[in-house]
Image (cartoon, rainbow, N blue to C red):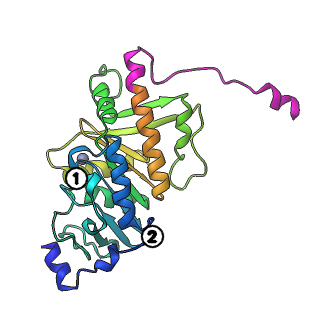
């Protein structure tokens, strides 16, 4: 239906044709090919979407992410989406179907003003949600928390806030329960965004993670930092090391002397 409507308007294939490697229609396939090598988008799962002004570029459903081409990309106009009505695409690929991740990506763009949203099925993300699921009833199973790890500095303090988290700060990532159909996650993702206004990611239990940022660079680096922290967290748990620690702050002697 979406592709028929787009065909009647000429399908706007020019929107996905560019020699610029940083054009969203070229960047999504090249990023997904890299993510595939990391095990983030195995077996057509996961995906990536980029917003440029009012235009949103989205990987399709069911495509092998490492083989995706610019011609496979959907494009929609953000201001022209009407709530509670079928989404309309201004450019559709000849094959494939729209991704079920689409409303979740749109939530990151409309609610957070994000420029890029990445969804992975990383095993480390899934394992963290499983560890939280089996936590004692006295502990929260709905939020992943970790502090005193250098890689935490890769995260901004929150939308509209200046600077990144510090080494001693606590990074908090909410966890929502999985649903039978991916698009049904949307309302729970939006609730988590409201409850954790500073979060740049939401974990989905037994499924994966959604990560967004102001632009592709920020979304990608936070996604990488998160995967590092998820893997570290799983291995810390195996070694009996807690994710939250209370360690002394080390004062730099040299800096104090120079001042
Ligand atoms: Zn998924």
Residue 179 in view here: yes
Q: Residue sitting at 16 percent across and 79 percent down?
A: 5
The image shows residue 47, relative to residue 124, as above or below, that is below
Q: Position of residue 57 (x, y in %)?
A: 33, 66
Q: Is mark 1 within 8 Å of ligand 1?
A: no
| Secondary structure of residue under mark 2 | loop
Q: Position of residue 115 (x, y in %)?
A: 43, 61
Name the residue beneath numbered marker 1. 64
**Quarter of the C terminus within the rendering:** top right
- Tell me how many marks there are: 2
Q: Residue sitting at 59 percent across and 33 percent down?
A: 167
The image shows residue 2, relative to residue 48, as above or below, that is below
Corner quadrant of residue 13: bottom left
Magenta segment boundaries in residue numbering: 234-259
Q: Residue sitting at 28 percent across and 66 percent down?
A: 73
Label 1 neighbour load within 10 Å: few <14, some 14-19, many 20+: some
Q: Position of residue 59 (x, y in %)?
A: 28, 60
Disc nearer the start of the sequence (2/1)? 2
Q: Position of residue 116 (x, y in %)?
A: 41, 58
Q: Is residue 243 magenta?
A: yes
Name the residue beneath numbered marker 2. 20
| Secondary structure of residue under mark 1 | loop
Pick the residue in front: 160 or 106. Answer: 106
Corner quadrant of residue 75: bottom left
């Amino acid at each position: 239906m979406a592709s028929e409507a787009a065909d009647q308007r000429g399908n706007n294939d020019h929107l996905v044709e560019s020699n610029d490697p940083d054009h969203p229609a070229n960047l999504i396939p090249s990023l997904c090919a890299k993510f595939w090598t990391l095990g983030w988008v195995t077996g057509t799962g996961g995906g990536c979407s980029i917003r440029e002004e009012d235009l949103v570029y989205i990987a399709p459903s069911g495509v092998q992410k490492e083989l995706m081409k610019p011609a496979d990309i959907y494009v929609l106009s953000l201001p022209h989406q009407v709530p509670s009505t079928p989404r309309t695409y201004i450019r559709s690929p000849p094959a494939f179907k729209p991704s079920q991740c689409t409303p979740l990506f749109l939530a990151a763009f409309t609610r957070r003003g994000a420029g890029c949203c990445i969804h992975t099925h990383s095993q480390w993300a899934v394992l963290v949600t499983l560890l939280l699921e089996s936590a004692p009833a006295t502990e929260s199973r709905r939020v992943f928390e970790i502090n005193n790890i250098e890689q935490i500095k890769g995260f901004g303090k929150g939308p509209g806030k200046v600077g990144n988290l510090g080494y001693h700060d606590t990074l908090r990532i909410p966890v929502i329960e999985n649903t039978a159909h991916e698009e049904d996650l949307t309302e729970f993702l939006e609730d988590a965004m409201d409850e954790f206004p500073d979060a740049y990611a939401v974990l989905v239990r037994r499924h994966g993670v959604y990560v967004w940022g102001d632009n592709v660079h920020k979304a990608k680096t936070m996604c990488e930092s998160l995967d590092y922290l998820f893997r570290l967290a799983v291995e810390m748990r195996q070694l009996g090391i807690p994710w939250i620690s209370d360690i002394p702050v080390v004062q730099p002697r040299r800096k104090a002397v120079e001042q």
